[in-house]
Image (spheres, grey):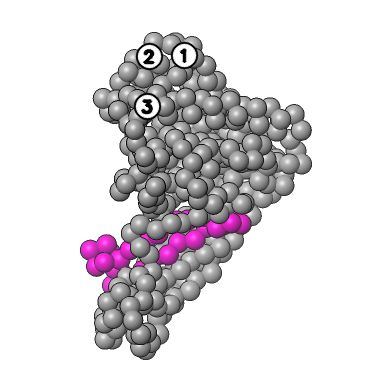
């Protein structure tokens, strides 16, 4: 089986940048139609994310829901984790059944490559003057093989099908009033209740901030006459950050060939971002990188050494390939978003303790 994996630039943690007074709680479920035989990549994974930090984790290999923050382990009783384990085992089976249904619906029964079903489910809330959290928005979204498949319109209380293949599911789920009411109620109420509890439990950790370390360096290009200039900011929290690569004080853009990994997670609940541009080795312009991290009041500019090292013998590897195998390790969990052939599997999708019964089958 030929597997292609693309770098995930946002990790699909949350599509909105949180304001200082906002908090979010999301659960991400990812299921593959078949094992792929790669280390750290499981047929089924589930993880809880509080303000973009992993708080719990489950996978099909270990079959147990575990805390990923010390305060979660300390504050929540043993039966919370036991019930959570049973719930996620149930969801694992739900995903297995429904991937099969979708493969049949899309005439993919004889496919040799794996297919992926993902689900994002969660909420965002803002802190009020009295310290309570008020619901801002919720999301309940499904994704199949890189395409949006189904999402819940919380305002109107209906399911939205962007593709013809999802219309049958929309009709089925719209016809189950209790499912729509439960989904809306969970996003607006129960989710916020859990969010409030977790924010209270992890208050000290959530308030910790970390400034970025900034490095500028060069990497060889496949083109011997060229070189990559790389600006790396790492170890920062919260995740909002600005990077500006400049040539003679002019900010470079995509039109100038600037590329970026966007924001990626480190394994210690901090983040990193790497911007880079390919230039001629003979270019004598002054290149600099400005990094602004408002969360820690950091505003720093670093210059590249004007003397570019000679090209090594042979062709060096490009710093970031278009398609690479990337294991983003968060607390020991490898989060991968697959490409089937050349199609990215995953803008995000997530879930809470959503009730899965026969009427919610895809």
Name the image quarter holding residue 281: bottom left
* Residue at image location 36% in from the left, 19% down from the top: 169
Name the foreground residue: 39 vs 359: 39
**Residue 190 in the image: above or below residue 314:** above
Which mark lies nearer to you, 3 or 1? 3
Residue 357 percent across, percent down from the top left: 52, 16
Do the residues under discs 3 and 1 have CB atoms within 8 angstroms?
no
Q: Which residue is mark 2?
A: 172
The residue that mark 1 highlights is 359
Q: Quarter holding the C terminus?
A: top left
Horizontal and vertical percent position of residue 347: 38, 42
Instruction: Give the Cα separation between the discs numbered 3 and 2.
Output: 14 Å
Q: Neighbour class for label 1 at 10 Å: few (<14), some, many (≥20)?
A: few
Q: Which residues are magenta?
A: 248-276
The residue shown at (54%, 39%) is: 45
Q: Secondary structure at mark 3?
A: helix
Circle nearer the N terminus (3, 1): 3
Task: Say if mark 1 contacts mark 2, CB within 8 Å.
Answer: yes
Q: Is residue 262 above or below residue 344?
A: below
Q: CA distance from mark 3 to mark 1?
A: 16 Å
Instruction: Give whichever of 170, 153 is nearer the camera.
Output: 170
- Of residues 41 and 263, the one nearer the viewer is 41
Residue 58 picture location, percent across and down: 61, 39
- Residue at the disc numbered 3: 102
In the displayed structure, does residue 60 sit left or right of residue 290? Answer: right
């Amino acid at each position: 089986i030929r597997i292609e994996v693309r770098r995930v630039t946002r990790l699909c943690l949350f599509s909105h940048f949180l304001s200082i007074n906002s908090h979010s709680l999301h659960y991400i479920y990812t299921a593959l139609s078949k094992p792929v035989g790669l280390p750290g990549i499981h047929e089924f994974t589930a993880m809880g994310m509080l303000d973009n930090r992993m708080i719990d984790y489950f996978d099909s290999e270990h079959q147990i829901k575990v805390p990923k923050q010390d305060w979660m382990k300390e504050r929540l009783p043993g039966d919370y984790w036991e019930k959570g384990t049973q719930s996620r085992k149930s969801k694992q089976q739900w995903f297995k059944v429904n991937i099969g249904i979708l493969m049949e619906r899309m005439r993919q029964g004889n496919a040799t490559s794996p297919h992926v079903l993902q689900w994002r489910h969660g909420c965002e809330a803002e802190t009020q003057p009295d310290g309570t959290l008020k619901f801002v928005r919720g999301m309940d979204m499904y994704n199949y093989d890189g395409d949006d498949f189904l999402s819940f319109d919380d305002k109107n209380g209906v399911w939205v099908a962007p593709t013809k293949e999802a219309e049958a599911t929309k009709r089925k789920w719209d016809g189950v009033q209790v499912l729509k009411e439960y989904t809306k109620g969970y996003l607006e109420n129960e989710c916020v209740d859990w969010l409030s509890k977790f924010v209270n439990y992890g208050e000290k950790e959530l308030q910790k901030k970390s400034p970025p370390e900034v490095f500028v360096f060069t990497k060889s290009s496949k083109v011997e006459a060229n070189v990559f200039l790389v600006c790396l900011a790492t170890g920062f929290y919260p995740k909002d950050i600005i990077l500006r690569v400049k040539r003679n004080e002019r900010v470079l853009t995509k039109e100038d060939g600037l590329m970026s990994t966007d924001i990626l997670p480190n394994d210690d609940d901090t983040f990193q971002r790497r911007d880079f541009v390919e230039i001629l080795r003979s270019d004598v312009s002054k290149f600099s990188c400005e990094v602004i991290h408002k969360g820690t009041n950091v505003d720093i500019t670093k210059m590249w050494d004007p003397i570019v090292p000679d090209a090594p013998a042979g062709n060096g590897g490009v710093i970031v390939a278009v398609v690479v195998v990337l294991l983003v390790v968060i607390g020991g969990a490898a989060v991968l978003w697959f490409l089937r052939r050349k199609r990215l599997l995953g803008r995000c999708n997530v879930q809470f303790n959503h009730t899965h019964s026969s009427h919610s089958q895809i």
